[in-house]
Image: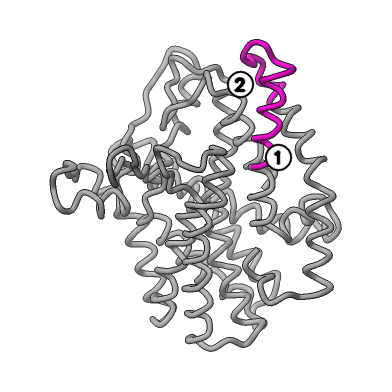
Amino acid sequence: MTIMLLDHVREFFYLHKQVTDPMDLTLISPELFFTRFITHFCAPLFVFLSGLSVWMHAKNKDLSHRQTSEFLLKRGIFLVILEVSVVGFGWTFSLSPDIIYFQVIWAIGCSMIALSLLIWLPWYWILSIAVVIIAGHNTLDQIHFTPSQPYYPLWAILHDRSMIDLSEGLKIRTSYPILPWIGIISLGYVFGRFYDSHISATQRIAWFRNGAIGALAFFILLRSINIYGDLHTRQLYDGTLLTLMSFINLTKYPPSLDFILLTIGVGVLSLSFLERYFSGHNSIFTTFGRVPLFFYILHLYVLHLFYLIASTFIFETPIESIWILWMIAFITLLVLYIPSKLFGNYKQKHKPWWGSYV
């Protein structure tokens, strides 16, 4: 959550230095590159952990497949509606935007809707489907449709980041094509099985660590071979730093196989270490993590207000220093801490029926 905030500070305060996907190494500074790079881990881990937490929620509540499917369907629809209303307004502060952006909340919502159907299958089928989607969707990179073709809207939603014309003056931008994200949430759901009571923490940590190391090794192999795994192949530069940057400069929209291997690999490896060495039940990170959707919506509105105030009264010229972005992110975290803690305490004490949605 905190790393995501940093990227959204960049989105608001670095409008004059927007990055491409993948990033253009000839135009971007190493400081901006690595600030953007570390935030790559947010979206895939959001979606992966969404799937994992769905399994844990169903297990802890002793929900049937039907109840879990209904929960996923309702929450997925709720998130999609939220994306095009409250979240969209938080980004633009416009009641009549020219473009409606389908971003990460949309991707999570659609993935949950898909998972509401997939959970009726045996777990090994869900795992197989997840692996096929994640490993194979880059074979579809060369398939494109023009706006005049009937499959163009569907393909823009599933795989091609595109613009869909709804009507005169209104368009949809499919920033997060959903096919790979369905694979990621399904993988996370299967990984939830590692938290079953018959599996010890020692076993889980060992399996997570070995699986993560295997995924990262496979990423290094694919990136070294430089044939498959990402639409944009790595390049060799005169300098070591640029060559390294090119090696990890991966496609996020939609997330390539290499992107998923790196981010989920590091994420699962982190889970193995966090479980053993981190007991942060009262930490600032746990406070934000207990209320993820509340934090997400609140931080957009706070950041947008900060930007309007700063651009009007403080910064006469665009921000050039990347470290100012980090400072703004830190200040914003401090502002968000108290409302997040209060809301988290309210959820824990009163347990409202809508608490699981936010």
Q: Tell me what residue is drawn at x 69 percent, y 48 percent.
A: 298
Find the distance from the CA under tag 2 to the CA under tag 1.
25 Å
Q: Amino acid at mark 2?
A: Glu
Q: Quadrant of residue 347?
A: bottom right
The residue where tag 2 is placed is: 31
Q: What residue do we see at 71% from left, 31% from top?
A: 306
Which image quadrant is residue 231 in? top left
Identify the residue at image location x=43%, y=71%.
115
Image coords of residue 149 (percent x, y): 13, 48
**Disc with the residue nearer the chain's start (2 vs 1):** 2
**What is the number of callouts on the image?**
2
Q: Main secondary structure of the magenta part?
A: helix
Q: Which residue is mark 1?
A: 302
Crowd class of label 1 (few under 14; some 14 to 19; many from 20; radius 10 Å): some
Q: Relative to 121, say whether 142 is above or below.
A: above
* Magenta highlight on residue 324: yes
Residue 120 in picture, x, y percent from top left: 41, 82
* 300 is within the stretch colored magenta: no
Q: Which residues are magenta?
A: 301-325
What's under tag 1, amino acid-wise?
Val
Tell me if residue 106 comes above or below residue 55 in the rendering. above
- Classify mark 1: helix, strand or loop: helix
Q: Say if 225 sits above or below 33 in the image.
A: below
Q: Secondary structure at mark 2?
A: helix
**Residue 128 location, quadrant:** bottom left
Residue 75, labelled with which disc?
none
Which quadrant holds the C terminus?
bottom right
Q: Position of residue 161 (x, y in %)?
A: 33, 42
Residue 57 at x, y percent in the picture? 63, 76
The foreground one among 128 and 1 is 1
The colour scheme of the drawn protein is: one colour
- Residue shown at the point (43%, 56%) measured from the top left: 181
